[in-house]
Image (cartoon, rainbow, N blue to C red):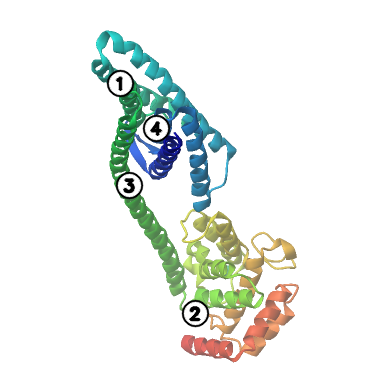
Amino acid sequence: MQAIGVWGDLQVLLEFLLFAILTYAAYNMYYYVPVGNHGNFRDDGHILCWIAASLIGGWPVLLFSVLILLVLYSWELFNHGLPYKPKNLLLFITQAVTIYEVSHFLTEVVFSLENPLGIFPAMFLTVCITQMVTVAMSSWLFRVSLRVGSWKRQLLKFNLIDSLYLSLFFICSAYIDTLQANWQYTLLMNGTIMCALIGLYYWRTVGILQTQTVQKKILEVETLNDQITKANQQVLLAFASALEKRDPYTAGHSERVANYAVQIGRELGLSEKDLDIIRLGGLLHDIGKIGIPDSVLIKPGKLTNEEYDVMKQHPVIGEELLRGATLDDLNAEERELMLEIVLSHHERPDGRGYPHGLTEAEIPLFARLTAVADAFDAMTSNRAYRSAMPLEKAAGILVEGCGTQFWPPAVEAFLRTLEREAVFAEVAASQEEST
Ligand SMILES: [Fe+2]
């Protein structure tokens, strides 16, 4: 008796162990089923385990499988860095209990059909009815699910493949009844579940291949989009560069302004991302000059008041132009910072700048840096109406303009960088180039 008891315990233990392995295997399998014209339904293989739980051992195995699935569920969340949401756990358990209960209810129906029809016709009929009903339900639920919220949509997860499980369940239930729950039954149950797993594996492969194809397409579209964005930015930069060619005296101005402004930003300890924004802002800061007529833009000599008013429109034109353009690598917030450079690079702390006459702290930080870089390059480059100023004189004008025309910390930072020999050499070289 003792030996039989131990053997019985061992059998139960093995059965539970086998179920745990099956659960693990099934949980990691997922598949896609096309539902309706526009959607695929994705599901994980764990539903199989609920069916198996109700088949093999009733409530004890069901509770055991709940435990395993909770462990796996938590592990998957942890593994993918997903947040734990009680709502999802609730849906998970609701789905399981629903399937378990529905399975039991339908078994009763099958057994009631068995007497007049015989077991095999009853099984066959039930499988057919289940399949047809589930297909019809899937289609209907898909349409309904498009109109309801996400958690309700999750609750409607009762699809085509579930019907296969239910069919399997009916077949197995019928066998249990016939075979009186002996070792053959255990073998048959596990064999059937293995077959279902092979089927799931097939669906999983199909699903993964479909997903890969879709992801490849998405990647292609994203790459194309990226290329368009890059091309757009290249066009803008080419525009800015071509613009300078209208006036040979300003050739390379934007490039140098961008470099100086980045130097100031770096000296002030700004981040690399900020420096990228400043560089792009520097390259594009005068792009609005595209809207300024040649008679004003490249006029040799001083501008009249009217002409100067026209010239003062270039920051606004530039900002409007760039607001409608696609720019690479900048999110909405960074883009605003870049646009601020374009719009406010002629503002002055004393409020005498343009276009809006902002004062001190009202002027965006990056624009304050760019203003110093812009003025310095304008002074140290040859212009139609005057020759390049010596570096020391230009530096002196920056110091004089501290607090009125320029933001003092930017000037101080710039002077520190100017003191470094490399910067002096670069400026001297650029002066030589433009003469
Ligand atoms: Fe400007």
User: What kind of element bears circle 4?
Assistant: helix
Q: Kindly identify which numbered label has been placed on residue 208.
A: 3
Which kind of residue does numbered mark 4 sit on?
Ala
Outermost residue on the left side: it is: 121
Is residue 148 in sight in this rendering?
A: no
Q: Residue at x 44, y 40 (%)?
A: 13
The front one of 96 and 219 is: 96
Give me the disc on residue 178: 1
Report how far apart the C-alphas of labels 4 and 3 lie in the structure.
25 Å
The numbered disc on residue 249 is 2
State how far apart marks 1 and 4 are (Cα).
Answer: 18 Å
Which circle's residue, 2 or 4, is located before the other in the chain? 4
- Image position of 380 with respect to 221: above or below: below
Residue 363 position in % (x across, y down): 69, 63
Three-letter amino acid code at disc 1?
A: Thr
Using the rendered image of the protein, determine whether residue 76 is visible from the camera's viewpoint. yes
Q: Rounded to the nearest whole Å, what is the CA distance between mark 3 and mark 1?
A: 39 Å
| Quadrant in which ligand 1 is drawn | bottom right
Query: Residue 227's image quarter?
Result: bottom left
Q: Secondary structure at mark 2?
A: helix
Q: Viewer-nearest of labels 2 and 3?
A: 3
Name the residue that disc number 4 marks: 52
Disc on the earlier residue, 4 or 3:
4
| Residue 117 drawn at (x, y percent) | 25, 11
- Give the residue drawn at x 38%, y 54%: 222
Q: Indicate the quadrant where residue 350 lies.
A: bottom right
Question: Which numbered tag is attached to residue 382?
Answer: none
As rendered, which of 164 and 116 lies closer to the eye?
116
* Amino acid at the residue labelled 3: Ile
Amino acid of disc 2 = Tyr
